[in-house]
Amino acid sequence: MRYWVKELLLFLGVEKSTTSHQEKLNSALGGFIGVVIIYGASNYLFGQTLSVFIIASVGASAVLVFAVPHGALSQPWPVIGGHMASAGVGVLCAVLINNKLIASASAVSLSILTMYYLRCLHPPGGATALTAVLGSGSHPEPDVWFIVNPVLFNVLLLIVFAFVYHFLLRNQYYPSHSLNRKHTFRKRPDHASTISQEDVIFALQRFDSFIDVSTEDLCELYECALESAKSNDLSYSQARIQAGKFYSNGLLGRRWSIRRVLAVDRSKVVFETVAGANEGECQACSLSDFLQWGQFEVVHQDASWVRNTGTYEPHSWTQ
C-alpha cells in the first residue's frame, strides 16, 4: 500500500520540501509586501479597474520571484520580457480576431511560442495575454499602451522590490547571477568522472524539455554535491553496522533506496527498505551482499535523508 501511495505522489509531482520554515515564511512575506506595493501604486495611478486585471498575473509572478528566486523562469528577463511579449500578442489577437474564444486560445498559444523564441518563458505571461483579450470587453479597441501601462510598470516594480528584498532582508542574491555575487572557484576535484559545464549543457539539450534551473546553478549544485561526497569519502566497510541505523546505496533516481537494519550478525543482515526502490519491503541478505550494496550511513533530517557525518568506528556487528 505504501508503495502505491508513494507512486501516486510521484505521479502527481508531490516532491519532498528541502526548504526551512524560515525560508517559507520569508517567501510569503515577500509576496505580501510586493503585492501591496504593486497594487497600491497601480490603483493610485491607473484606477481600480485596470489594476485588478493586471494584478492577477503579476501575483503569479510574485510566487516565482519570492518562492523560487533562483529558477530560470523567475529571472528579470523572463519576468519582464514574458509579460511584455504576451501583452503584445494578446492585444494583437484582441484587435485581429473577433471571436473571443479563438482570440483567447490564440493569445495564450502564441504567447508561449513567442516567449520560447525570445528566451523569456514565464507562465504568468499566459495570464497577461488572456487579460489583454478578455479585459478588452469594456474597451472595444484595446490600447497598445496596455503593454507599458500598466504591464511594464507593474513588472518593473516587482523586479526592483525583489532585488531590494532579497538583498537587504534575506541576504540572498536576485537575480541568481548577480553582478556583486561572490563566486567560489573550487579546485577541480581529482575524480575521473567529473562532469564539466559542457556535459551539463549537452545533457539538457538531449533532455529537450524546459527545466526551471539555470545551467550555472545546476553546475554549482553538482560541485557542492561532489565536494560533499569527497569530504565524506569514508570506506563503508569501516562503518559500524548496527540494528536501528539507516544506510543508503548512494545511487540516483529510481535506483536509490534507504534501508533500516533490523538485526545483524556475522553472516546475515535483516533490513526494511524505508525509502526509494522497494519501499516497505522487509528482506534479509548476507553481510557481504549488504556491504556491497551500501555506500554510507544516513539520518533523517528536515524531512530529507542526509549523510551521517558523525564519527565512524571500526567495523563491528551488534546483535
Image: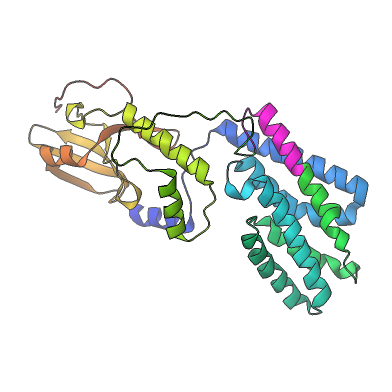
Quick one: 281 or 36, which is closer to the camera? 36
Residue 115 is situated, as x and y percent measured from the top left of the image, at 66, 60
- Please tell me whether residue 174 is drawn above or below residue 182 in the rendered image: below
- Magenta-colored span: 158-174
Residue 52 is situated, as x and y percent measured from the top left of the image, at 83, 54
Quick one: 254 or 271, which is closer to the camera? 254
In the visual, does 100 lie left or right of 82? right
The figure's colour scheme reads rainbow
In the visual, does 238 lie left or right of 228? left
Q: Residue at x 73, y 61 (%)?
A: 86
Q: Residue at x 37, y 30 (%)?
A: 228
In the visual, does 93 lie left or right of 280? right
Image quadrant where one finds the N terminus: bottom left
Q: Residue at x 86, y 63 (%)?
A: 144
Residue at the far left in the pictured view = 267
Total marks placed: 0
Q: Is residue 45 visible?
A: yes
Residue 21 is situated, as x and y percent measured from the top left of the image, at 56, 33
Image quadrant where one finds the C terminus: top left
Q: Quadrant of residue 293?
A: top left
Q: Quadrant of residue 286?
A: top left
Residue 101 is situated, as x and y percent measured from the top left of the image, at 74, 76
Overall secondary structure of the magenta section? helix
Q: Is residue 308 visible?
A: no
Q: Quadrant of residue 165?
A: top right
Query: Magenta segment: does it hold 163?
Result: yes
Quick one: 161 or 215, which is closer to the camera? 215
Query: Magenta segment: does it hold 145?
Result: no
